[in-house]
Amino acid sequence: MPDIVLQDGSIKQDEWVVVSRPEDGDSLNPPNQKALIPVDLWLAGYERYAGREDIGVWFDSHQEPETLGDKVNELTVIAVNFPKFTDGRGYSIGRLLRERMGYQNELRAIGDVLLDQLQFMKRCGFDTYALRPDKDIQKAARCLGFFSQGYQAATDTDTPLFRRRAG
């Protein structure tokens, strides 16, 4: 199994498998282990998946987190796919889940996740990061701690730096 980076920069083995969207006509069959399934398929099969701590969801960058509604905190893990490093919609999904929807559990970045994005993902509320396989996971801790302070308010602090300094 691959490794995953935690928000503090530590590394652990990833227990979750990302289940791809099935082809047209095929049904979704999550494996008998912790699985992240497409969010729309989780909603469509809500009666089957509700209350299962071994099933989480993943959002593609074009999907809206509001589709979860009041079910958001029923999920142990929500992953957000970054299909390519230039697609920044995943940052917005992370902030919406944390700030507007009050998501309290694990928020994971998956897909084309690069080292230089980790600090920004952290500020948007992501807890764990599945790096692209060709990246050196041992450098992740340094990248997560590169900046000691952020200027703007974000999910990690609701007060901008100029107000923190004035206080």
Image: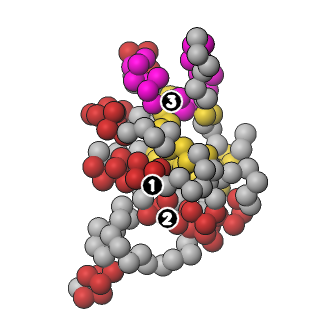
Residue 47 location (% of width, % of height): 38, 15
**Kind of residue at disc 1:** Tyr
Tell me, yes or no, whether the highlighted magenta stretch contains residue 38.
Answer: yes
Which residue is drawn at the image coordinates 32% and 70% (left, top)? Answer: 153
Q: How many marks?
A: 3
**Numbered disc 3: secondary structure:** strand
Give amino acid for label 2: Phe
**Dot 2: within a 10 Å radius of its alpha carbon, few (fewer than 14), some, or many (20 or more) residues?**
some
The correct choice, above or below, for 38 with respect to 8 in the image is above
The one nearer the camera, 24 or 120, is 24
Nearer the N terminus, badge 3 or badge 1?
3
* Residue under label 2: 120
The amino acid at mark 3 is: Pro
- Determine the CA span between mark 3 and mark 1: 18 Å
Q: Quadrant of residue 124?
A: bottom left
Of all residues shown, which one is farthest toward the bottom?
A: 166
Q: Which label sits on residue 91?
A: 1
Quarter of the picture containing the C terminus is bottom left
Residue sitting at x 33%, y 33%: 67
Q: Counting residues from the N terminus, which is met first, the one under dot 1 or under dot 2?
A: 1
- Span highlighted in magenta in the image: 26-46
Give SS at disc 1: helix
Residue 20, image x, y percentages: 61, 29
Compared with residue 87, is residue 61 higher up or lower down, i.e. above or below? above
Residue 6 has which mark?
A: none
Q: Are marks 1 and 2 in contact (CB under 8 Å)?
A: yes
Say if residue 165 shows up in the picture: yes
Q: Quadrant of residue 156?
A: bottom left
User: Mark 3 highlights which residue?
Assistant: 38
